[in-house]
Amino acid sequence: MVNRQPKRLLAARAAHVEELEKTLAENHGPSKHAAHEDAYVAIRDAFNAAARKLQDYARRRRGKTKIHASTPLARVAKIFPIEDYGFLQTPDGREIYFHKNSVSPPGFDRLEIGTEVYYAEELGEKGPQATTVRVVGQ
């Protein structure tokens, strides 16, 4: 015996889509979402959105979500206020250059030697440099 239930459901869905198309065709006013004037486009977009949500859920369940690296911590080692730059010292003893413009508020003028900061590092022309410097607790 063959189960005809899926075919009946499919036919019912097709009839519903046709009704939606007729309703949309009767609506002569401008659509707020012009891309969704076609029922097939609206259905496709709804299924695409549902698929993205399922993929995100599956990634979370598998533990495959992005993990951001912890922000490195350093102390201000040297400051040259007239030249608008300074150096940070990392826990492993490296010195990293930073410019006044890379310091987040309250700003470069408030930094003192020994101040703990978070920083983002990249390789500059003359070695490592901090692109962002933020005082701990700010």
Image: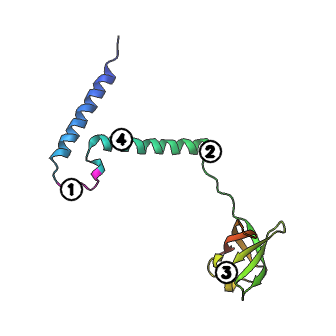
Q: Is residue 31 magenta?
A: yes
Kindly state the secondary structure of the residue where label 1 is placed. loop
Q: Earlier in the sequence, mark 4 or mark 1?
A: 1
Q: What is the spatial separation of the Cα atoms under label 3 and label 2, in whole angstroms? A: 39 Å
In which quadrant of the rendered image does the C terminus lie?
A: bottom right
Q: Quadrant of residue 93?
A: bottom right
Q: Which residue is mark 2?
A: 63
Residue that appears at 75% across and 85% down: 80
Residue 86: which quarter of the image?
Answer: bottom right
In front here: 59 or 44?
44
Residue identifier under label 3? 100
The type of colouring in the image is rainbow
What secondary structure predominates along the stretch shown in magenta?
loop
Which mark sits nearer the N-terminus, 3 or 1?
1
Callout 2 touching callout 1 (CB < 8 Å): no
Three-letter code, disc 3: Lys
- Mark 1: give few (<14), some (14-19) or many (20+) Cα within 10 Å: few
Residue placed under numbered mark 4 in the picture:
44
Q: Which residue is mark 1?
A: 30
Q: Secondary structure at mark 4?
A: helix
User: In the image as oriented, which residue stretches furthest toward the top?
Assistant: 1
Q: Nearer the viewer, mark 2 or mark 1?
A: 1
Judged left or right of residue 26, residue 46 is: right
Q: Earlier in the sequence, mark 3 or mark 4?
A: 4
Q: Which residues are magenta?
A: 29-34
Question: Which amino acid type is shown beneath numbered disc 4?
Answer: Arg
Q: Which x, y percent locates residue 133?
A: 68, 73
The disc, 2 or 4, on the residue closer to the chain's N-terminal end is 4
Task: Judge by depth and name the residue closer to the eye, 5 or 48.
Answer: 48
Residue 123, x across and y down, in percent: 72, 65
